């Protein structure tokens, strides 16, 4: 395997696209909190002083979507126009409407909520069984948010983006080569101060956890001043950060976004199931890396295909691993929902800093019985 560089990016919870994702998922969670069988597809557009909520719902629950959105925006930190959005002065439009009876009928008996293909991935580069570049990128912007919210750095504002380049030798990460952090800030702070604090307080503590002794090249606010951010600086849309949400480009993506969709939509639940299965393959040491693809037809419960690729790292053949996961995992929508308890209001927590690699999420848990069955195949 030749040596190579690989780069992944992440964005903070204050990035406009991520704000839209969190609003969509907070509305979904509020429906599920009242009605676990709610069918929801909610999308948002957020721009300077305006939020539009749209989508389809089939539920007996009645919620105030605008109030839910306002609370989410408050938690992100957009409470003043100087930060990029003032939740109390903004205009809100709610276009949520009844879900199509044809779609509802297709899923009522356990069929998939749509056609499509989903990918799951796992590797042994980090303790989370995630690729190192995306984990570093997530942790950097997550730390930016933590320091902003606890007041440690009072000039930080909600919008931020990170990017990390890792150098690989023989397919293994050996050093961090470049780190980019663009962080929104108040106008009364110099770029020199931002650079010093960003490297010392935000980036270095993260790198030391994953690859101690790293000395990358740093690009801190490389475009210069970044005072205009959030929805005032850039319009946000639900579902526009699908690579940030998944594996940072380390494996293919089926194209479907996650946020705002209830688990009958296999764009979401199928991707979680594929990650769950791939994670078990790597955790069992059947492979160092594993990509799993699932595909579905609308209204049909069983996947139309299951594909496994261990990228030449498998201890047994990919065909045998494929046979094992088909036997050990129920990839029907109902099977996935029941195994992972997906009717719970857990989705707002997924809508920033990645849907994978967080130990508290059900698809990041290990089933010891499944793990033992996989290990016994060696």
Image: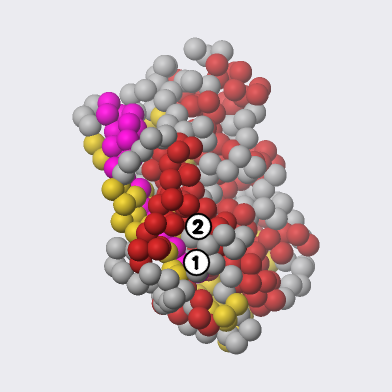
- Residue at point 24%, 26% (across, down): 1
Say which mark, if any, is on residue 156. Answer: 1
Which residue range is magenta in the image? 156-177
State yes or no: residue 175 in magenta: yes
Residue 315: give x, y in percent of width and height: 41, 16
Q: Are marks 1 and 2 in contact (CB under 8 Å)?
A: yes
- Classify mark 1: helix, strand or loop: strand
Q: Is residue 251 above or below residue 142?
A: above
Q: Residues within 10 Å of mark 2 (few under 14, many from 20)?
A: many
Q: Nearer the viewer, residue 88 or 68?
A: 88
Q: Picture quarter containing residue 72?
A: bottom right
- Residue at point 62%, 24% (across, down): 370
Is the magenta region chiefly helix, strand or loop?
strand
Q: Would residue 34 be found to the left or right of residue 16 on screen?
A: right
**Extreme residue toward the left, this view:** 2
**Pointer 2 residue:** 144
């Amino acid at each position: 395997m030749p040596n190579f560089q690989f780069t992944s990016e992440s964005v903070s919870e204050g990035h406009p696209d991520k704000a839209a994702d969190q609003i969509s998922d907070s509305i979904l969670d509020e429906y599920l909190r009242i009605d676990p069988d709610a069918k929801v597809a909610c999308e948002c557009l957020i721009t300077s002083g305006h939020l539009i909520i749209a989508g389809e719902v089939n539920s007996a629950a009645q919620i105030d979507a605008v109030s839910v959105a306002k609370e989410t925006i408050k938690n992100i930190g957009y409470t003043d126009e100087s930060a990029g959005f003032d939740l109390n002065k903004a205009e809100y439009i709610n276009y949520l409407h009844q879900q199509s009876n044809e779609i509802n009928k297709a899923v009522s008996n356990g069929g998939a909520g749509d056609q499509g293909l989903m990918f799951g991935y796992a590797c042994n580069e980090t303790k989370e069984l995630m690729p190192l570049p995306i984990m570093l990128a997530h942790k950097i912007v997550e730390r930016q948010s933590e320091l902003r919210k606890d007041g440690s750095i009072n000039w930080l504002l909600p919008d931020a983006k990170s990017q990390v380049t890792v150098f690989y030798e023989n397919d293994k990460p050996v050093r961090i080569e470049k780190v980019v952090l663009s962080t929104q800030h108040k106008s009364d702070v110099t770029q020199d101060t931002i650079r010093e604090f960003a490297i010392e307080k935000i980036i270095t503590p993260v790198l030391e956890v994953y690859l101690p002794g790293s000395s990358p090249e740093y690009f801190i606010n490389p475009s210069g001043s970044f005072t205009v951010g959030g929805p005032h600086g850039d319009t946000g849309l639900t579902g526009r950060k699908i690579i940030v949400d998944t594996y940072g480009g380390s494996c293919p993506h089926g194209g479907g976004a996650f946020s705002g969709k209830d688990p009958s939509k296999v764009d979401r639940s199928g991707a979680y199931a594929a990650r769950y299965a791939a994670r078990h393959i790597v955790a069992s040491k059947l492979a160092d890396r594993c990509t799993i693809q699932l595909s579905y037809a609308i209204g049909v419960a069983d996947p139309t295909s299951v594909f496994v690729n261990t990228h030449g790292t498998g201890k047994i053949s990919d065909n045998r691993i494929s046979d094992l996961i088909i036997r050990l995992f129920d990839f029907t929508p109902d099977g996935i929902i029941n195994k992972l308890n997906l009717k719970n209001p857990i989705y707002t927590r997924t809508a920033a800093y990645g849907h994978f690699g967080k130990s508290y999420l059900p698809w990041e848990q290990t089933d010891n019985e499944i793990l033992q069955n996989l290990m016994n195949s060696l």
